[in-house]
Image (cartoon, grey):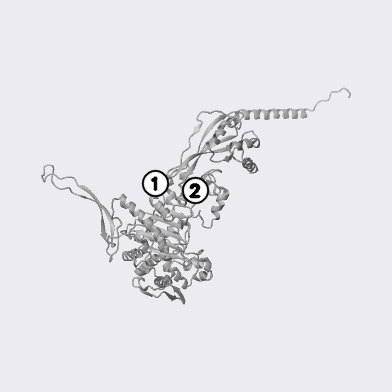
């Protein structure tokens, strides 16, 4: 009816009331959530807008030599950063900032563009320039009001020895890569972290890394610093110092000896496995990586055919040449074959229907009747061809593997290679072919498929000269590490392995090695050291066949063979073993001269330190070994008054003496884990 008021149905009215109530409830909950439930979260966000956190980067631990001298230190450096969480147009300030930092504006704009395209979070700053100068730092401090987005960060950068000294052993640092972040070892690190990339820096990275701190500053709405809150600074914790086994004087001698040459030198103490020196050439300067290496410099290093980044001491895999004959001698004597073996070397011989020449044939002479001793000091190939034929590849491989050929030594450095010791099983697995007896002949003189690294040869020859005790090489002593990091040095296998070598065989081999450097009979008389009990073994290896060189005469210079020498002092139970790989050196005697320089440096130092000018003398009885002892003896009778009733306290005495070895009986060794070999000549 007209004029009649229409009433809202009760159901609809109730629905509207509930909707309004729901809206008020949601608003009330939102208000409660903002003011009560999320109070801490929003308070924290407000603090973040008001407080800026600046990182304090921890310095890496210093590297020291065995005597505590600093090898690698840190120096403070400053980097210029652009803070992207400031509400400013970074592109607008780029030109003025570039002028103040003495750099092209295009570089700054390019960095900004790359960060924007990568969609990186706003809190991640842009590193504009590393290692800024004092005047550039002053520019930043003077323009903080004008450029609040411009900040400095103090960084401790590595200060390495100059000229690539110890570069391969020490390694270098750099920004953690994407591949590293994807590995379990670096999963807790973040982009931008500086970590070890090679050498000791990489292997002991977790120990050398410190714990970063931070400082907090109050900023206004324009991002300008206006003060500091309480407890503003959390101090950084420096990384642990690391003492190496390196003897800096021996290292210097090795560096000088290899200067201008390509190759590697390793000096070990075979009594415990300590690395005294390690050199690889050509080298690089790790200081180039301390700031930020350019892509051009990196490409030059990577593409250099001489491989300057390769640590040839532990990563070169080349044939050992005649140095392998020492291992052949161990196998031949322990298997009871070489004791009475004599061959008549006429410059070569036929084995399995193929003629194999001796190196002496190139000098138009022969070795004549040769036994094992002469075969070692004159390096007669024919003798060891014959011994290889008698032994067979399986017995050769058994003893070579026992002394460490074809296996990693377990040194505490990254990326060590294992080398290769061929066998019937290896060829079947690698090529699905059987082993032919004729292949054994070249193995007998360290050629063919045999491949070793200098560290392997140093450990093998040093262990043989120690009577069969082989220690794991290491550049850091376990007891010098904090307890929580000792697993790093102890994770690479047993510290020592004993291979049973009959004492008579041990004496025969080491005496023959002493003849190698003896004038008039050995292959390396030019390396002879007057008055020093110096022994070793030369070796040389071909890179290509003689037939190839004859057909490519212009390639002779390009394919020069390698020279090898492994030397020890003294000849038995030596204190030092030096392995030298001289790439392109062709002949072992040249490598022997290099090793002699390192040996002499060690002897001269020890004679001075121990105040004993006859130490390591070649006049000592070679059939004796030095022993040390401590004992007590009663003091002379008689008291103060000279009566017999009073007895004086015992006196403690100490000294060294020589003990003559009984060549007919067994020697006694310390209880060390055995390799489980029982050759016919072993006890």
User: Residue 236: x percent and y percent?
Assistant: 48, 37
Residue 149, percent from left and from top: 60, 34
- Residue 100 visible to the viewer: yes
Of badges 1 and 2, the one in the foreground is: 2
Task: Describe the element under mark 2 as helix, strand or loop.
Answer: loop
* Residue farthest to the right, as pictured: 2
Q: Left or right? Give the position of 262 relative to 528.
A: right
> Which of the image's four quarters has the C terminus?
bottom left
Residue 152, compared with residue 65, is above or below; it is above
Of callouts 1 and 2, which one flags the residue occurring earlier in the amino acid sequence?
2
Q: CA distance from mark 1 to mark 2?
A: 25 Å
Q: Which residue is mark 1?
A: 480
Q: Residue furthest front?
A: 554
**Image-based side of 166 in relation to 639, left or right:** right
Task: Name the image quarter holding the N terminus.
Answer: top right
Q: Residues within 10 Å of mark 2 (few under 14, many from 20)?
A: many
Q: Is residue 373 above or below residue 615?
A: below
Q: Is residue 294 left or right of residue 451?
A: right
> Local crowd at mark 1 within 10 Å, few (<14), some, or many (≥20)?
some
The numbered mark at residue 326 is: none
Classify mark 1: helix, strand or loop. Answer: helix
> Is 464 situated above or below 647?
below
Quarter where residue 647 is shown? top left
- Would you name the residue on which mark 2 appears? 286
Task: Please state which of residues 335 and 176 is positioned toward the viewer in this rendering.
Answer: 176
């Amino acid at each position: 009816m007209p004029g009649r008021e229409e009433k809202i149905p009760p159901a609809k009215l109730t629905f509207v009331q509930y909707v309004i109530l729901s809206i008020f409830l949601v608003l009330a909950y939102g208000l409660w959530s903002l003011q009560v439930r999320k109070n801490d979260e929003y308070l924290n966000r407000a603090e973040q807008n008001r407080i800026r956190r600046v990182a304090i980067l921890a310095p890496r631990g210093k590297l020291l030599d065995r005597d505590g001298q600093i090898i690698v230190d840190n120096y403070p450096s400053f980097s210029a950063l652009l803070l992207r969480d400031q509400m400013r147009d970074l592109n607008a300030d780029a030109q003025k900032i570039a002028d103040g930092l003495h750099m092209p504006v295009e570089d700054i704009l390019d960095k900004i563009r790359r960060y924007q395209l990568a969609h990186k979070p706003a809190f991640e700053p842009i590193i504009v320039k590393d290692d800024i100068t004092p005047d550039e730092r002053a520019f930043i401090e003077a323009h903080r009001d004008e450029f609040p987005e411009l900040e400095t960060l103090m960084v401790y950068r590595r200060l390495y020895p100059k000229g690539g000294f110890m570069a391969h052993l020490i390694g270098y640092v750099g920004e953690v890569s994407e591949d590293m972040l994807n590995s379990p070892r670096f999963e807790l690190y973040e982009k931008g972290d500086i970590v070890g990339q090679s050498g000791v820096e990489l292997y002991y990275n977790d120990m050398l890394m410190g714990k970063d701190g931070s400082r907090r500053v109050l900023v206004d709405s324009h991002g300008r610093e206006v003060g500091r809150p309480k407890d503003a600074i959390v101090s950084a914790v420096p990384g642990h110092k690391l003492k190496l086994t390196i003897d800096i004087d021996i290292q210097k001698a090795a560096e000088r000896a290899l200067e201008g040459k390509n190759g590697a030198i390793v000096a070990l103490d075979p009594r415990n496995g300590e690395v005294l020196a390690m050199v690889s050439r050509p080298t690089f300067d790790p200081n180039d990586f301390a700031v930020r290496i350019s892509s051009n410099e990196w490409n030059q290093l990577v593409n250099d055919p001489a491989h300057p980044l390769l640590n040839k001491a532990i990563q070169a895999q080349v044939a050992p040449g005649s140095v392998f004959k020492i291992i052949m001698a161990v196998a031949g004597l322990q298997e009871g074959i070489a004791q009475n073996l004599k061959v008549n070397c006429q410059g070569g011989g036929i084995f399995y229907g193929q003629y194999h020449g001796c190196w002496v044939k190139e000098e138009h002479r022969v070795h004549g009747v040769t036994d094992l001793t002469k075969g070692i000091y004159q390096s007669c190939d024919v003798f060891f061809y014959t011994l290889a034929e008698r032994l067979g590849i399986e017995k050769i491989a058994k003893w070579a593997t026992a002394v460490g050929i074809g296996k990693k030594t377990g040194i505490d450095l990254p990326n060590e290679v294992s080398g290769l010791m061929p066998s019937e099983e290896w060829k079947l697995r690698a090529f699905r072919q059987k082993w032919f007896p004729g292949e054994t002949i070249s193995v007998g003189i360290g050629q063919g498929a045999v491949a070793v690294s200098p560290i392997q040869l140093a450990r093998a020859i040093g262990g043989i000269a120690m009577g069969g005790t082989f220690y794991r090489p290491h550049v850091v002593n376990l007891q010098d590490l904090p307890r929580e990091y000792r697993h790093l040095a102890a994770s690479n296998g047993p510290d020592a392995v004993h291979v049973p070598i009959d004492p008579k065989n041990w004496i025969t081999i080491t005496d023959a090695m002493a003849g190698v450097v003896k004038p008039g009979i050995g292959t390396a008389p030019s390396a002879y050291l007057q008055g020093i009990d110096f022994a070793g073994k030369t070796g040389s290896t071909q890179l290509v066949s003689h037939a190839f060189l004859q057909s490519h005469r212009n390639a002779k210079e390009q394919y020069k063979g390698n020279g090898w020498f492994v030397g020890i002092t003294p000849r038995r139970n030596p204190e030092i073993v030096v392995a030298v790989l001289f790439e392109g050196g062709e002949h072992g005697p040249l490598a022997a001269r290099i090793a002699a320089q390192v040996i002499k440096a060690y002897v001269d130092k020890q004679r001075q330190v121990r105040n004993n000018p006859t130490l390591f003398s070649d006049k000592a009885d070679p059939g004796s070994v030095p022993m040390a002892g401590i004992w007590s003896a009663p003091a002379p009778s008689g008291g103060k008054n000279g009566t017999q009733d009073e007895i004086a306290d015992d006196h403690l005495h100490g000294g060294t003496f020589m003990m003559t070895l009984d060549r007919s009986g067994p020697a006694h060794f310390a209880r060390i884990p055995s390799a489980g070999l029982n050759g016919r000549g072993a006890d």
